[in-house]
C-alpha cells in the first residue's frame, strides 16, 4: 500500500520489496475510484484465479484430470495460500512462474522472455529462473551427452575385457564401438543450444531494469538490498551458509512466528518428501522446486516459508499425482487416508492462519 501510493525513496524500509506489484496496483487503482486497497484485493483474487485455472490445465495435460484436480485442491487449501486473496505479490508471481513453465514446455520463446523478464521485478528469487531456463537451453544436448557417456563407458568396458582375456578384443556392442548399430549424434547441437540460451538474457535484463529503477527512484541502485538489512532476515549470503541453515532447521522456537516457526519447518519437510515423486515424474521439476522451495528456505532461514511454498507448483503436482484416487482400488487404502488427512490438516491450518492474519497476528 505504501509503495503503490508513495513510491520508493532512500532510507525507506519498504524498498526491500520489489516494484512490479505496487506499480500494477497503482496503475489499476484509478479504475476502482483511486482505492489502492480495493485495487490490490481485486488484482490478487483475479490473478490467483487465472493462475489456478492455468495450473489445472497444464497439469491435466501431463498427468490427467484427477491428478490436476487434487493438485489444485492441495494448492488452494495449503495454509500459505491465504495470501493469494490479499494485497501480496504471490498471485502475480505464481501466474508469471506458470507462464514461464508453460512457455518453456511448449517452446514459446516470446512468452518465456516476457515472463522471465518480469519475474525479477516481482520477487528477488525471480532472478534464479535462469536455472530452469538453462536446463531448457541444454535440453537439445542431452542425447549427445548421453550417447558420448555410453560410448565412453562401453569403450572402457571393452578395454577391460581385452586386459582380462590377454589381448583378445571382445566388444559386445555399444555406441561408437564396432557392431553396435547405435545412431550416435555426430555433432554437438551448438546452434540449437545457443538459440535457446538467448532466453537467459530475459531475467538478467529484468534484474538490470530493477536496479535501474531503484537508482532513478532512490539514487542508489542497491537501495533494496540495503533495506533488507532493516528486516534482518533474507540475505544472499545465507544461500551458501549451510551450517546456519541446518542449525536453524533444528532450533525452532514457536509453533508459528516471524522467526523459529515449527509450521514453516514442517512445510519444508513435506516439500522434501515430494522430491522422489518429482524425480520420477519429470526431473526438470526438481530445478523448479529448488528455485521456488529450497532457495527461499535458505535465504531467510525458513522465515515466511509457508507463504513462499504456496508458489512452489511442483510440490502440489507431486501431491496430486501421488495421492490421487486409484480407480481400481477397493475400500480405503493408505493413500486415501493420507489424501484426506493431509487435506484436513491443510484446511484447518489455512483457517487458523486467516484468523491470525485478520486479527493482526503473524501468519506468514
Image (cartoon, helix red, strand yellow):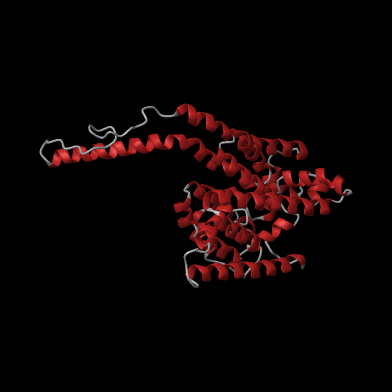
Residue 170 position within the rendered picture, expressed as x and y whole percent measured from the top left = 16, 37
Q: Quadrant of residue 186?
A: top left
Rendered residue at 55%/41% (across/down): 105
Q: Quadrant of residue 122?
A: top right
Task: Tell me if 324 is positioned left or right of 32 in this view.
Answer: left
Depth check, front residue: 229 or 83: 83
Rendered residue at 51%/29% (across/down): 194
Location of residue 199 with respect to 361 vertically, above or below:
above
Q: Residue furthest bottom?
A: 331
Task: Tell me if 176 is positioned left or right of 73 in this view.
Answer: left
Residue 158 position within the rendered picture, expressed as x and y whole percent measured from the top left = 20, 38
Depth check, front residue: 116 or 336: 336
Location of residue 230 with respect to 167 vertically, above or below:
below
**Would residue 61 be seen by someone viewing this image from the given angle?**
yes
Residue 28 position within the rendered picture, expressed as x and y whole percent measured from the top left = 81, 45
Location of residue 33 with respect to 362 vertically, above or below:
above
Task: Tell me if 260 is positioned left or right of 281 in this view.
Answer: right
Count of picture labels: 0
Depth check, front residue: 41 or 36: 41
**Would residue 291 be seen by someone viewing this image from the given angle?**
no
Q: Quadrant of the C terminus?
A: bottom right
Residue 160 position within the rendered picture, expressed as x and y whole percent measured from the top left = 19, 40
Depth check, front residue: 164 or 70: 70
Q: Residue furthest right?
A: 33
Task: Tell me if 43 is positioned left or right of 57 in this view.
Answer: right
Q: Residue furthest left?
A: 166
Rendered residue at 54%/60% (across/down): 319
Amino acid at each position: 500500500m505504501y509503495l503503490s501510493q508513495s513510491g520508493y525513496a532512500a532510507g525507506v524500509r519498504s524498498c526491500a520489496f520489489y516494484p512490479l506489484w505496487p506499480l500494477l496496483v497503482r496503475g489499476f487503482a484509478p479504475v476502482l475510484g483511486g482505492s489502492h486497497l480495493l485495487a490490490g484485493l481485486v488484482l490478487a483474487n483475479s490473478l490467483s484465479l487465472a493462475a489456478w485455472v492455468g495450473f489445472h490445465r497444464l497439469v491435466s495435460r501431463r498427468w490427467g484430470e484427477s491428478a490436476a484436480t487434487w493438485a489444485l485442491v492441495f494448492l488452494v487449501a495449503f495454509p500459505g495460500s491465504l495470501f493469494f486473496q490479499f494485497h501480496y505479490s504471490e498471485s502475480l508471481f505464481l501466474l508469471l512462474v506458470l507462464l514461464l513453465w508453460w512457455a518453456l514446455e511448449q517452446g514459446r520463446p516470446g512468452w518465456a522472455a516476457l515472463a522471465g523478464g518480469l519475474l525479477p521485478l516481482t520477487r528477488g528469487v525471480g532472478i534464479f529462473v535462469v536455472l530452469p531456463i538453462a536446463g531448457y537451453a541444454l535440453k537439445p544436448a542431452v542425447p549427445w551427452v548421453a550417447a558420448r557417456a555410453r560410448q565412453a563407458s562401453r569403450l572402457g568396458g571393452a578395454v577391460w575385457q581385452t586386459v582380462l582375456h590377454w589381448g583378445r578384443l571382445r566388444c559386445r556392442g555399444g555406441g561408437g564401438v564396432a557392431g553396435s548399430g547405435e545412431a550416435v549424434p555426430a555433432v554437438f547441437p551448438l546452434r540449437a543450444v545457443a538459440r535457446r540460451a538467448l532466453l537467459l538474457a530475459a531475467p538478467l535484463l529484468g534484474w538490470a531494469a530493477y536496479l535501474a529503477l531503484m537508482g532513478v527512484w532512490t539514487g542508489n541502485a542497491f537501495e533494496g538490498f540495503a533495506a533488507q538489512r532493516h528486516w534482518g532476515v533474507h540475505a544472499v549470503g545465507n544461500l551458501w551458509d549451510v551450517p546456519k541453515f541446518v542449525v536453524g532447521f533444528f532450533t525452532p522456537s514457536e509453533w508459528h512466528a516471524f522467526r523459529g516457526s515449527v509450521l514453516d519447518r514442517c512445510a519444508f519437510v513435506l516439500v522434501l518428501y515430494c522430491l522422489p515423486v518429482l524425480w520420477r515424474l519429470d526431473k526438470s521439476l526438481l530445478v523448479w522446486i529448488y528455485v521456488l522451495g529450497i532457495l527461499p528456505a535458505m535465504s531467510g532461514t525458513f522465515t515466511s516459508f509457508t507463504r513462499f511454498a504456496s508458489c512452489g507448483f511442483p510440490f502440489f503436482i507431486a501431491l496430486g499425482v501421488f495421492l490421487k484416487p486409484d480407480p481400481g482400488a477397493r475400500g480405503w487404502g493408505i493413500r486415501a487416508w493420507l489424501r484426506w488427512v493431509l487435506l484436513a490438516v491443510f484446511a484447518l491450518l489455512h483457517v487458523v492462519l486467516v484468523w491470525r492474519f485478520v486479527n493482526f497476528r503473524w501468519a506468514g
